[in-house]
């Protein structure tokens, strides 16, 4: 046996080495926790405090896109929910995708079944390079569902923030393309935050053209103003399957 191999074996079997390794990991986890603040209320020493976690429980609302499609959102994009979503999207705190994914799972469960695939709205190449992860896809996985990546971003889109409804619709046009052919496969389309819904309209249109049957659209959160397209309907079962 070579000395190198011997050292390797000793490290693998020596319990004191692995215990110290665990202590280092424990110290690092503790340091992470102590430097953390709750995204909802800034309470120090926690990744998410219990009262704020409670605010992330799904309270579904139905909103309409410019094309009249009903989108069911798990949360309203305000207060604690908005702060947690921003922390996940803009500050890389992907651990928050777990409690947010639980909220998404509630609205997904009204539509998703074994016969329905769940398709994320695609992430632009620029956003993926900046974050290193795709937000809608991550949320779907944390909701316990395997996403079907049927769409991809076709071209760089301007940042939607600050654009009005018609500018968003123009901006969304041609921004998405199909990667797969649907052949009648039923899908639920998922986005993270719905503002006017222009992106969801564009994605639905592309899926329709590719032969998919879009049975529903859901979002993690809907902005309260929602571009002036009518008020929220809280959990209205009449519009659920539009
Ligand atoms: Zn908190």
Image (cartoon, rainbow, N blue to C red):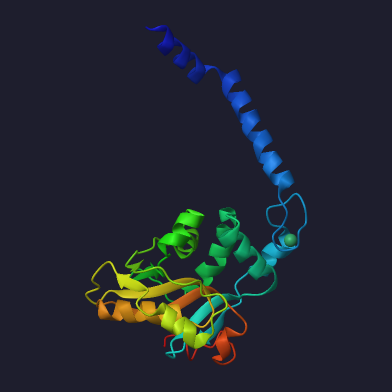
Percent from the top left, x then y, of residue 186? 31, 76
Q: How many marks?
A: 0
Q: Quadrant of residue 94?
A: bottom right
Q: What is the quadrant of the C terminus in the image?
A: bottom left
Q: Let me know if residue 213 appears in the view.
A: no
* Rendered position, 93 above or below 117: above
Residue at the far right in the pictured view: 43
| Residue under the point 47% across and 76% down | 218
| Residue under the point 51% across and 17% down | 11
Ligand 1 quarter of the rendering: bottom right
Percent from the top left, x then y, of residue 241? 42, 85
Q: Seen in the image, is 146 located left or right of residue 105?
A: left
Nearer to us in this view, 242 or 192: 192
Q: Seen in the image, is 80 located left or right of residue 73?
A: right
Q: Quadrant of residue 151?
A: bottom left
Percent from the top left, x then y, of residue 63? 53, 85
* Rendered position, 214 above or below 30: below
Percent from the top left, x then y, of residue 75? 60, 74
Q: Seen in the image, is 192 located left or right of residue 53?
A: left
Nearer to us in this view, 75 or 226: 226
| Residue under the point 74% across and 64% down | 51
Nearer to us in this view, 127 or 37: 127
* Rendered position, 233 above or below 137: below
Q: What is the quadrant of the N terminus in the image?
A: top left
Q: Let me know if residue 136 appears in the view.
A: yes
């Amino acid at each position: 046996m070579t000395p190198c191999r011997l050292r390797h074996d000793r490290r693998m079997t020596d319990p004191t080495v692995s215990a110290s390794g665990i202590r280092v990991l424990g110290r690092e986890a503790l340091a992470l926790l102590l430097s953390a603040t709750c995204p909802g209320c800034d309470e120090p020493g926690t990744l998410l405090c219990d009262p704020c976690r409670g605010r992330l429980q799904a309270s579904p609302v139905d909103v309409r896109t410019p094309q009249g499609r009903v989108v069911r959102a798990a949360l309203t994009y305000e207060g604690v929910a908005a702060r947690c979503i921003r922390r996940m999207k803009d500050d890389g705190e992907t651990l928050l995708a777990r409690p947010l994914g639980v909220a998404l799972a509630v609205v997904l469960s009204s539509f998703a079944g074994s016969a329905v695939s769940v398709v994320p709205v695609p992430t632009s190449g620029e956003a993926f390079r900046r974050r290193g992860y795709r937000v809608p896809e991550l949320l779907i996985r944390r909701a316990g569902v395997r996403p079907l990546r049927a769409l991809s971003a076709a071209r760089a889109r301007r940042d939607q923030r600050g654009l009005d409804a018609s500018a968003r619709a123009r901006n969304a046009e041609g921004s998405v393309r199909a990667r797969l052919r649907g052949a009648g496969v039923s899908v639920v389309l998922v986005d993270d935050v719905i503002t006017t819904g222009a992106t969801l309209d564009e994605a639905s249109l592309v899926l329709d053209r590719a032969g998919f049957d879009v049975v529903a659209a859901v979002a993690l959160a809907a902005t309260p103003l929602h571009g002036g397209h009518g008020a929220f309907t809280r959990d209205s079962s009449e519009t659920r399957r539009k």
